[in-house]
Image (cartoon, rainbow, N blue to C red):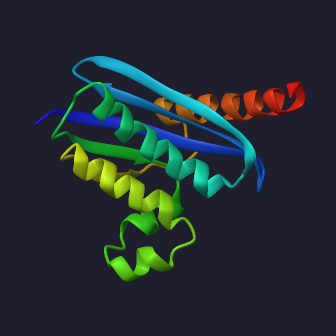
Amino acid sequence: MFKVVAYTDGACSGNPGVGGYAGIIQVGGKEIIVADCSVKTTTNNKMELTAVLAVIRELNKIGLKECKVQMCIDSQYIKDCASHREKAWYEAHANKDIWFEIISTAKAGKHKISFKKVKAHSGDPMNERVDKLAKEQCIRAKHLLIEK
């Protein structure tokens, strides 16, 4: 079983507004960055969740299966959501579509996901990097929207 550490973050310009997300995956001494933006109206919470989903998708895409993934997040929202395991809670949740996709994508890769809350803007170098990348994607979304 591969041990993976991933840092994720989401950002939004306005809430709702355009958004961006990023993830930094550390596995086997290598680093993989996933990042993108949304020019559609979105929320910070959706971008936070999308970052987690993007990391899991990337692991599956590059053929890593059965990983033990520690997601380092600065989002209390994700931490609170991850602590709920009841299907009824997920079904009533505002972002249930993304949560169900996170769950099904992790199951498809046979990954074991755990969440570690890190304090935002506290000097954690990896958290600061992923925050910067997510904000850069948010700026990219603004530029793409203007260019359309």
Tell me residue 88's x, y (percent). 38, 82
Tell me residue 46's x, y (percent). 59, 54
Side (left or right) of 66 relative to 88 = left
**Residue at (35, 41) in percent of width and height:** 56
Image quadrant containing the C terminus: top right
Side (left or right) of 104 relative to 126 = left
**Residue at (18, 47) in percent of width and height:** 110
Q: Residue furthest front?
A: 148
Q: Is residue 1 above or below residue 95?
A: above
**Residue at (28, 49) in percent of width and height:** 106
Tell me residue 40's x, y (percent). 74, 46
Q: Nearer the viewer, residue 45 or 90?
A: 90
Q: Quadrant of residue 29?
A: top left
Side (left or right) of 93 relative to 143 = left
Image quadrant containing the N terminus: top left
Answer yes or no: is residue 112 visible.
no
Tell me residue 147's x, y (percent). 87, 24
Q: Nearer the viewer, residue 110 or 33?
A: 110
